[in-house]
Image: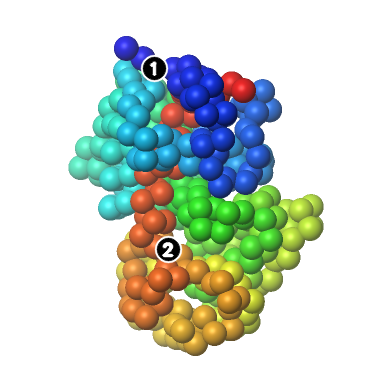
Amino acid sequence: MLFNLRILLNNAALRNGHNFVVRNFRCGQPLQNKVQLKGRDLLTLKNFTGEEIKYMLWLSADLKFRIKEKGEYLPLLQGKSLGMIFEKRSTRTRLSTETGFALLGGHPCFLTTQDIHLGVNESLMDTARVLSSMTDAVLARVYKQSDLDILAKEASIPIINGLSDSYHPIQILADYLTLQEHYGSLKGLTLSWIGDGNNILHSIMMSAAKFGMHLQAATPKGYEPDPSVTKLAEQYAKENGTKLSLTNDPLEAARGGNVLITDTWISMGQEEEKKKRLQAFQGYQVTMKTAKVAASDWTFLHCLPRKPEEVDDEVFYSPRSLVFPEAENRKWTIMVSSAQAFGSLCFVF
């Protein structure tokens, strides 16, 4: 039997005024008539408004509370299947997607490069059409963002970006949910990025200003974010009255920051650059010295896996580190990313 979350929520609202659902999530009440996500691709957060992203975070927090704390059974995706294309290996993306999708009653289908070769044995167009006939959505973890764009163009089902060299939107949703839980509100926070101008930074740049967050990013010379992303981020900052600062000085980026963030210096596919990158990123390790110039309430994020040269043990395992709640929240946000594509989360107030 399919459970409709509309019924569950209405019953809960009658019991307790529905206040417990929102808890400390201060993004306001989501209005379904203003936020329409059904059937949409999730390729990059630049395609979503602040209200739409807030709505996804609100749903994620609600699912987490209902399932983890209340023990409710919500088979919202019963009879649905999700194709999972993984050109790059992963622990968190695979586990969060498989366990989260299954927890909602759906069936995840994992496909590695041993099972499917995008654009090699079969064209991307043909792959998109075949998957559209057999699954209800696809999460693809790939190298090239252009492959996702082609899949989205040719498929008749929603395509979710599980990671590309350009963007990693599902990671950023988990990051924001983690910060929301810790600080109670995202507005006014200063994010301090110290590391590579990579897909994680790009995704933050495409979304932080929409929440009223400031961004201070330090990258080594030659490893700055993509100029086209920077140009759009500057536009977002101007529209939302936030600050965007790009520098090559890690301490300058950390100064006054509420959230210290870093990531791997060597992404998959960049192994041949390891020696060059390790040399270029000297001085970029996040340490307590870095934290001393941050805000008094500083916290630390890293999407994992982590290498000691990126952040030392004192910071990584400190009480200020949110890396493990951040990892868990990948599960709750990917549940919403996949379920909302089907329109399976229906809220009525």
Image quarter of residue 348:
top right
The residue shown at (29%, 38%) is 98
Residue kind at label 2, given as amino acid type: Leu
- Most distant residue in the top direction: 1
Can residue 192 be seen? no
Position of the C terminus, as image quadrant, is: top right
Image quarter of residue 333:
top left
Q: Is residue 69 left or right of residue 8?
A: left
User: Judging from the image, what secondary structure is the residue with disc 2 in?
Assistant: loop
The picture places residue 61, in percent across and down from the top left corner, at 48, 41
According to the image, label 1 marks what residue? 3
Q: Residues within 10 Å of mark 2 (few under 14, many from 20)?
A: many
Position of the N terminus, as image quadrant, is: top left
Q: Are marks 1 and 2 in contact (CB under 8 Å)?
A: no
Residue kind at label 1, given as amino acid type: Phe
The picture places residue 116, in percent across and down from the top left corner, at 27, 37
Q: Residues within 10 Å of mark 1 (few under 14, many from 20)?
A: some
The residue shown at (57%, 28%) is 17
Q: CA–CA distance between discs 1 and 2?
A: 33 Å
Give the total of numbered labels. Answer: 2
Can residue 338 be seen? yes
Image quarter of residue 331:
top left
Out of 146 and 158, give the one closest to the viewer: 158
According to the image, label 2 marks what residue? 322
